[in-house]
């Protein structure tokens, strides 16, 4: 008989206060506020738009919502250049809107995690403006990394560090000194050796914890502390070392004392609040250092995100991740897409080896088939999972945006990152029709493709086999199955080449990453499948690039 996806009950509302250790198996949904929902028709998403769509997220079946930055900002890097950490940027609303969003989310059984950007501020932050005004040698400059230049007249940068966005990581100011910015020039790095910086951020944590947020995703968590003396790295193309090698400005051991102090603050508050690290490290073992019992709770698994759709490679990174997290008692995390990488429906549509920023659409049908299968594999693994807005619709990256509409600062700097992150940030579609397919009443800040309408929430809701209904079913089954969610191990089963098969109690997952159909044992009753499979005489035939969930109960 043929199987695709079985019916699943509607997810039940969960009272926030009653789920202990919720973060060990949570499915966390990333909202990029400017591209999620626009409440006032100005073409830019906002907090009221997010608030209005919270019931959709509750019904999708996620546990928490992570909001990308909405703080007061000149928007040089889409809000990751913060001018005031205690204010909401007017384009997104105000503090009352943030308070209402948090309260409504809690009423729906959803937790709220906010982004925190401690590595750098905006150049419009009061501290940095004061540092510029007071000049060389002033105490205000000690809160950032100001240095004299090299060369006869100080005309050369203090060292050879390169910006992640391309070009030198130093900018010279009018009085001749240089300041460090690992990202855009509008994002000067804080000097975390200065006690005032630590004091300020502990105060910021308390501000938002008092507002009721349930946790923080820490941007560039690996970058706060720099090697003593700011030594040269040597060589060009330094971005290629990111996440692959030791660097004097990333993953320094001193960051861990910062997070131990932060953990003391967090533990003052009831309700199991959490920290999540965005930490690019050379190995998953180094990542595990961030989630030791007295530091953070979770860390993004970029090694998994970067792995190709290949059974052997996936098994390696799964095993290494679980082995690295087990000694520190932290949950593994699994993620396929976010606001900084090409959507996985497009990555998997292209040949392997192209990295995580891809400029070509590839084979759309192939990419979607693999993306659906990869999602079921991810949600079957032990630990916590992250979903990026729109992936539940099977959205591809928009790879043909005109140059004149691009806003990614890396796009304009000529080196470093490719600068094509705008493609994954195009506002998502809610309805088949309308000026912005239901995103808002006044268009959208990035143009949406004509195909968006048929990928919308409206077009997919209630349609058997749609990607949206696959996600809804998967999250419902995940919550209902006692053997899914938290854990630290899988039992690998014998499987044909190109196939992953593992057991977790009475649950079995089989993922076929090969380009051909394969025959495996039929392990029991089918719970869910990403594509059609046939069963006969105790065997199951899985189509190419598909995943199936069974229960042996």
Image (cartoon, rainbow, N blue to C red):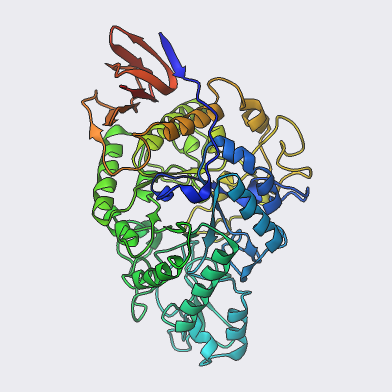
Q: Quadrant of the C terminus?
A: top left
Rendered image quadrant of residue 132: bottom right
* Horizontal arrangement in the rendering, residue 504 relative to residue 347 (left or right): left
Percent x, y of residue 383: 36, 44
Q: Quadrant of the N terminus?
A: top left
Q: Vertically, is 156 above or below 445?
A: below
Q: Which residue occupies 31% across, 42% down?
A: 487
Q: Position of residue 385 (x, y in %)?
A: 43, 43
Q: Position of residue 126 (x, y in %)?
A: 62, 79
In the image shown, does 96 or 439 lie closer to the viewer? 96
The answer to whether residue 396 of the structure is visible from this angle is: no
Direction from residue 435 to residue 448 in the image, left or right: left
Q: Residue furthest bottom?
A: 137
The quadrant holding residue 544 is top left
| Residue at (65% x, 33% y) in the render | 452
The residue nearer to you, when weighing 358 against 84, is 84
Q: How many marks?
A: 0
One can see residue 49 in this view: yes
Query: Residue 58, relative to residue 95: is it above or below?
Result: above
Using residue 519 as the reference point, say whether residue 261 is left or right of it. Answer: right
Q: Nearer the viewer, residue 365 or 139?
A: 139
Residue most extreme to the left: 494
Q: Quarter of the image holding residue 334?
A: top left
Q: Position of residue 179 (x, y in %)?
A: 50, 79
């Amino acid at each position: 008989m043929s199987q695709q996806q079985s019916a699943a009950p509607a997810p039940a509302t969960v009272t926030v206060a009653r789920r202990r250790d919720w973060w060990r198996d949570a499915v966390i949904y990333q909202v990029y506020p400017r591209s999620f929902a626009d409440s006032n028709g100005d073409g830019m998403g906002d907090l009221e738009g997010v608030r209005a769509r919270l019931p959709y997220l509750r019904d999708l079946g996620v546990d928490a919502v992570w909001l990308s930055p909405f703080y007061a900002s000149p928007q040089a890097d889409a809000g990751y250049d913060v001018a005031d950490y205690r204010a909401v940027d007017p384009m997104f609303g105000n503090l009352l809107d943030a308070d209402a969003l948090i309260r409504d989310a809690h009423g729906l059984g959803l937790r709220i995690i906010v982004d925190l950007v401690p590595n750098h501020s905006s150049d419009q932050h009061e501290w940095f403006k004061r540092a510029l005004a007071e000049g060389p040698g002033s105490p205000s400059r000690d809160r950032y990394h100001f240095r004299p230049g090299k060369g006869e007249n100080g005309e050369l940068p203090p060292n050879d560090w390169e910006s992640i966005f391309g070009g030198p990581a130093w900018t010279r100011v009018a009085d001749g000194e240089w300041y460090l910015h690992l990202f855009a020039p509008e994002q000067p790095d804080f000097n975390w050796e200065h006690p005032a910086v630590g004091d300020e951020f502990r105060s910021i944590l308390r501000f938002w914890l008092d507002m009721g947020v349930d946790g923080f995703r820490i941007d560039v968590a690996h970058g706060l502390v720099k090697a003593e003396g700011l030594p040269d790295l040597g060589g060009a193309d330094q971005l290629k070392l990111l996440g692959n090698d030791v660097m004097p400005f990333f993953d320094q051991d001193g960051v861990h004392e910062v997070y131990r102090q932060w953990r003391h603050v967090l533990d003052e508050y009831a309700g199991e609040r959490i920290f999540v690290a965005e930490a690019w490290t050379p190995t998953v073992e180094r990542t595990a250092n961030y989630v030791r019992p007295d530091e953070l709770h979770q860390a993004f698994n970029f090694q998994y995100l970067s792995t190709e759709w290949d059974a052997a490679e996936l098994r390696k990174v799964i095993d290494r991740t679980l082995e690295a997290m087990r000694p520190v008692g932290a949950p593994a995390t699994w993620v396929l897409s976010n606001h900084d990488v090409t959507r996985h429906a497009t990555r998997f549509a292209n040949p392997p080896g192209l990295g995580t920023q891809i400029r070509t659409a590839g084979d759309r049908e192939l990419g979607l088939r693999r993306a659906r299968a990869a999602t079921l594999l991810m949600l079957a693994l032990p630990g916590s999972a992250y979903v990026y807005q729109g992936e539940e619709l099977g959205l591809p990256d928009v790879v043909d945006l005109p140059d004149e509409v691009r806003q990614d600062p890396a796009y304009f700097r000529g080196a470093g990152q490719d600068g094509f992150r705008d493609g994954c940030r195009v506002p998502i579609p809610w309805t088949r029709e309308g000026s912005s397919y239901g995103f808002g009443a006044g268009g959208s800040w990035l143009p949406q493709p004509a195909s968006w309408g048929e990928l919308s929430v409206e077009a997919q809701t209630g349609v058997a086999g749609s990607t949206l209904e696959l996600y809804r079913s998967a999250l419902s089954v995940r919550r209902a199955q006692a053997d899914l969610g938290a854990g630290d191990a899988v039992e690998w089963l014998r499987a044909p080449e190109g196939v992953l098969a593992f057991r977790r109690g009475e649950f079995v997952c089989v993922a076929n990453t090969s380009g051909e159909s394969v025959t495996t044992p039929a392990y029991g009753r089918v719970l869910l499948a990403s594509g059609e499979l046939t069963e006969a005489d105790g065997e199951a035939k899985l189509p190419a690039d598909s995943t199936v969930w069974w229960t042996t109960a």
